[in-house]
Structure formats: structure tokens, C-alpha cells
Image (cartoon, rainbow, N blue to C red):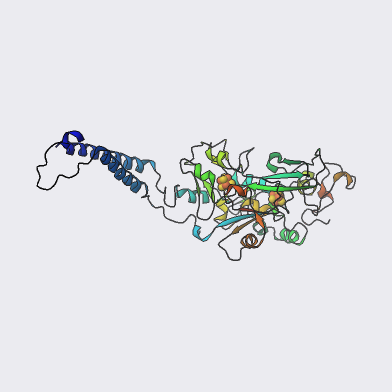
Amino acid sequence: MESARHVFRVLFLLLVVVVIFSVGRTFLVPKSYGAYGPYRFDNVAEQAAIRPPQHGGSASCGACHAERLKAVAAGAHRRVGCEVCHAPLARHVQDGARIAAMPVDRSFTLCARCHRRIEGRPAAFPQIVLAQHQGGVEGTACIDCHAPHSPKL
Amino acid sequence: MDETQSDAPAPAPQPAPEPVGRREFLSNALRLGGGVLVFLAGAPALGEGPVAEGYDWTQHRYAYLIDTEKCIGCGSCVRACKAENGVPDGFFRTWVERYVVSPEASHVDSPKGGLDGFPPIQTPFTPTKSFFVPKMCNHCKETPCVQVCPVGASYRTQDGLVLVDAERCIGCGYCVQACPYGSRFLSPTTHTAEKCTWCYHRVTKGLKPACVEVCPTGTRQFGDMRREDDPVRLAIAHGRVSVLQPHLLTEPQCFYLGLDKEVR
Ligand code: SF4
Ligand code: SF4
């Protein structure tokens, strides 16, 4: 019958499209895609393991430098983490072993980042204007007078 | 074909069934086909296993709190972010802006995103107030960047982060355009979209994001909205917080304390 042939043709075409689609989909769509939404769920775990943490936090520094940490914790810089002025822990220790010396920046620039008086800082925050400070000259190391780990103001 | 049949006598004892017109047939076929496709597309292979060892992402929903009144513009956060995430030179996942404001004029600067702190500044007007505003991806709940991604590379996790799957990203840059906060960039090395991840590799291990870890003033705080006694949760619940560009209805999950009207 003429109409049956037409029906068959269209159904056959549809079937071919569906088969091509599902075969193509299996190859093109990553395994975990759509598990929780229109994205590749495996990537969440990949992001969680993308690299080991670089910063360890002051407590991890205290594992070896307990005395230092105690001194810092008692002073005006108690909220300043070791890694703020030095460097991320991962540059110094990896897998529990020391791999390099921790950088020690003695420059004026380091202290100036927080304590130079500039437009923008909260007024109550301790800041200095170099010209009015001990006749200071740019480049003089603050830490010649101020102990960085427990500064007296 | 439909015309040839209409005048043929009905030989069957029962009344001739209504002939199915071509139009009706095709529309039915399309509907059936569409249904099959939807069924196939909606039957994903389920991913299993935890996101990380001993970490259940349904037990967390993170939020970020920035107290602009405390920020001293030291840029420690920007440096920490760069070191923690290997952010390419000249690009920023987080940055700090300085606003110097008078009733008549205002000046905003962010030299190298605040990476090296801020220099003294002379403005042609006399400022009446000035302050720093740290910025980053807001991990919006109704996020335009995810909506525009054509390949499902940008997505929002169940613990409340917006992440980019670099493997799927085709580098079209739509999301970079769509983000109203300028939080994204195309990495010059991988040519994929990159942005703040709230240090997902740290928070899934119970650590704070690097910027929060180093901030010496407590400007930046990270919290978990699913923990009853979380200080950030309480601050958001009880404090007068605001978000950037609330009129865009993106529902940012970075909340600000003391945000000035000048800030956009
Ligand atoms: S801040 Fe921009 S990149 Fe981040 S979630 Fe919102 S729209 Fe997306
Ligand atoms: S580390 Fe803290 S105080 Fe320093 S610029 Fe960043 S947010 Fe501001």
C-alpha cells in the first residue's frame, strides 16, 4: 500500500536519526556529564585536586618555629601570617622536608605596603609619612629599629 | 498522496478511518522524535564518588564576606592568590581597587590589581573620603556567566561555587563578556576562561582560600552557610551587608560590609 510505504520511510528515517544521535552522543558526551547538571561532574574532583595547597598558614610554620610563632602571637603583628612577609610555605617545605630557605625581605618596600601613609587606608591604622619619621630617607630599612616579629610602636 | 485516497470507496465493513494528513503525520512524528531525543539526552551516566577524600559537597554552602572598612590595601591577598593559583602575569583572580572620593569628583585606581600595594596619590580635588575595595568572582547564584556558556564548561557546584572546566572550555569568551563584574579572563597560556575558584583545592581540605589565609586585617572572611555557628553566616544574617550591583539580580555570594555608593 502506498501510504504504508510512506509511513515506513519516515519511521525508518527517524530510526536512523535516533541511532546516529545516540551513537554520536556516547562518543561526544563525557562520562559524568549531566550527573548533577549540564556540566562534567568529574571536573569537580579534578578542581579539588588541581594542585597541592601552597599556603600552609602560621600554625603549620609553628610546627618547626614554635618560639617565633609565640613571639609573633604576643605582639602587634599577631594577625599577620608568616607567609604574608615571607613566602608561601610550599616554597620552603614539601612533603615534610625543607627544600629551600624561606625568603627574608628586609626592604622598606615590604613594610611600606601596609604602613606608609597613603590615601585610602583607615585613619586608625598605624601609618608613617617617611619625611616626618626620624628624618627618614626612602630605602632605610624599618627593621633596623623595629623588630618585625613583635614591633613596638 | 492524500488526494488520491479521498475518493476511493471504503471496502471495509467499519466506517473508513480518517486518513492521516501529511501535516498531522509529520507533526506527530516530530513530536515522537523530539520525545525520544529528550529521553536520550536526559539519561546521563551518573557520576559517583565523593568530590574529594572525606568531603561531602552537600554538607557545605560557602559564602564570602568582605569588610571594606578594615582593608588597608596591602595587596597581600593579590600576591597570595597569584602564588597559590599560578595566575598569569597581568591577570587577576582577585584585585583591590582604591576609591578616592569628594562630593564633586572621584578617582579609582588599581595599579597592577594592587599586587605591589598602592603608591601615594595626588588628586586634582580634595578628597573627603577614601577606601579600598577588594574584588573577585562573586560566585553568583543566578550567574550570567554559566547561562551563556555554550558547552557546559562553566557551572555551579552544590557547595556554592562557580567553576570552569578547562577541558571543556573552548575559549569563546562569552562568559568573560557576560560577567558584569569583570571577574573572568582568558588565560594567555591555556586559552580557556579562568577566574577565582575560592581555592577549591584548599576549601575541600578544610583550609581557607589563600587570600583569606593571608589577609592581616580580617577584611576577608570565608564561611559556610550550612554551619549554624559560622561567624560569616551570622554576620550576613545580623549585619547590614550589601552586594555589588544588586540591580542585576545575579545574587552574588560575596557580601560586603561598609560598601560605599561609589562602588560598582
Ligand atoms: S562574578 Fe562573574 S564570573 Fe563570578 S559567578 Fe558572577 S557572573 Fe560569573
Ligand atoms: S590582604 Fe586584606 S587588608 Fe590587605 S589588601 Fe587584601 S583584603 Fe585588604
Determine whether, in the image, residue B153 is placed left or right of residue B259.
left
Q: Please tell me which residue lies in front, A136 or A127.
A: A127
Determine whether, in the image, residue A88 is placed left or right of residue A140.
left
Please give the name of the residue rendered at 49% of the width and 41% of the height, measured from the top-left corner: B149
Please give the name of the residue rendered at 50% of the width and 52% of the height, measured from the top-left corner: B157
Q: Please tell me which residue lies in front, B107 or B66.
A: B107
Percent position (x, y) of residue B5?
16, 36
Query: Is any part of residue B196 visible from this angle?
Result: no
Residue B187 quadrant:
top right
Furthest residue in direction right, as rendered? A135
Percent position (x, y) of residue B132?
72, 48
Percent position (x, y) of residue A93?
62, 51
Determine whether, in the image, residue B39 is placed left or right of residue B169.
left
Percent position (x, y) of residue B119?
77, 41
Query: Is any part of residue A126 visible from this angle?
Result: yes
The mark total stands at 0
Q: Please tell me which residue lies in front, A14 or A19.
A: A14
Q: Quadrant of the C terminus of chain B?
A: top right
Q: Quadrant of the N terminus of chain B?
A: top left
Residue B33 quadrant:
top left
Determine whether, in the image, residue A143 is placed left or right of residue A26.
right
Please give the name of the residue rendered at 63% of the width and 44% of the height, measured from the top-left corner: B82
Furthest residue in direction bottom, as rendered? B229
